[in-house]
Amino acid sequence: MRQRWFVLALLVVVAVPMTAQRGGRRFGGFGRFAPAPAATPYDGQFAIVRLWYPRYSGWSYDYPEMEQNLNLILSEVTAITPSPSGGNVLRMDDPELMKFPIAYLSEPGYWFPSDAEVEGLRTYIEKGGFLIVDDFHFGEEWAVFESAMTRVLPQGRIIRLDASHPIFNTFFSIESLDVPYPGRLGQQGLMGEFYGIHEQNDPTRRLSVVINYNMDIGDYMEHSATGRYAVDPSNEAYKFGINYLIYGMTR
């Protein structure tokens, strides 16, 4: 209980100032080209990389507030000092991607990577990069994601994770994965499911990809200071986010 309210207090103290920095993030729907912001030069400090893809603006949803709020919490509860840039946006085939340990992919239900992007992301994961996949639901979106992910990792096997997996106990101990999807769908009973792909498909080895299905932790974190969503699932979203970052940087 003390840990729960400690996290809540941090959300109130450090996330509220970020509301003043809100700007446009959504660049339209399917078929609308969403140009990536100019990449921030690598400075050796930790930064989350958001993966850009064409033809749909879903890659940009919750950006940059998600990264800014998550980095504020990260700097308050850990010894990590994130880059002042807050985050970065790169193409999957950009060689600069290899300098960053954590990559975040939003709305993969509309992700149709080119051959170059497939090869770039495969190389990134095989060299030790950690991929967080977030913000999708419905069977059609899963089918699109699974098809693309199979191209990236043809031998990769997606398995469902339970609360005993080390990724859910890396920093915070997440006791339950029963977290509702933000908003109306969650109120109607849509609950998050969590999947992963392990290195060499061996559950005893490193998790290379973590997949939040029927879940959008980015949306929870973006709106954590606005009161849009309930406190409890918003807190849980930060716990997932922090655990993912610590896991990805230490495995």
Image (cartoon, rainbow, N blue to C red):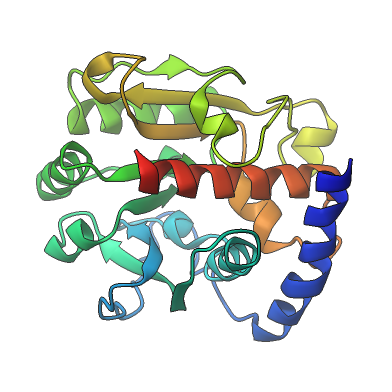
Q: Is residue 74 above or below residue 151?
A: below
Please name the residue shown 33% across and 60% down the image: 52
- Residue 116, image x and y in percent? 10, 49
Q: Is residue 16 above or below residue 156?
A: below
Task: Report how many numbered discs are placed on residues in the image.
Answer: 0
| Quarter of the N terminus within the rendering | top right
Please name the residue shown 17% across and 49% down the image: 117
Front residue of this view, candidates 110 and 159? 159
Front residue of this view, candidates 245 and 18? 245
Q: Quadrant of residue 179?
A: top right
Please name the residue shown 52% across and 21% down the image: 165
Is residue 78 found left or right of 99 in the rendered image? right
Q: Farthest front residue?
A: 79
Residue 111 visible? The answer is no
Q: Farthest bottom residue?
A: 20
- Residue 134, image x and y in percent? 51, 42
Q: Is residue 182 above or below residue 88?
A: above
Front residue of this view, candidates 81 and 199? 81
- Residue 42, image x and y in percent? 25, 76
Please name the residue shown 65% across and 29% down the image: 192
Q: Is residue 180 above or below residue 60?
A: above
| Quarter of the C terminus within the rendering | top left
Is residue 165 found left or right of 175 in the rendered image? left
Is residue 163 found left or right of 36 in the rendered image? right
- Residue 194, image x and y in percent? 54, 26
Residue 46 visible? The answer is yes
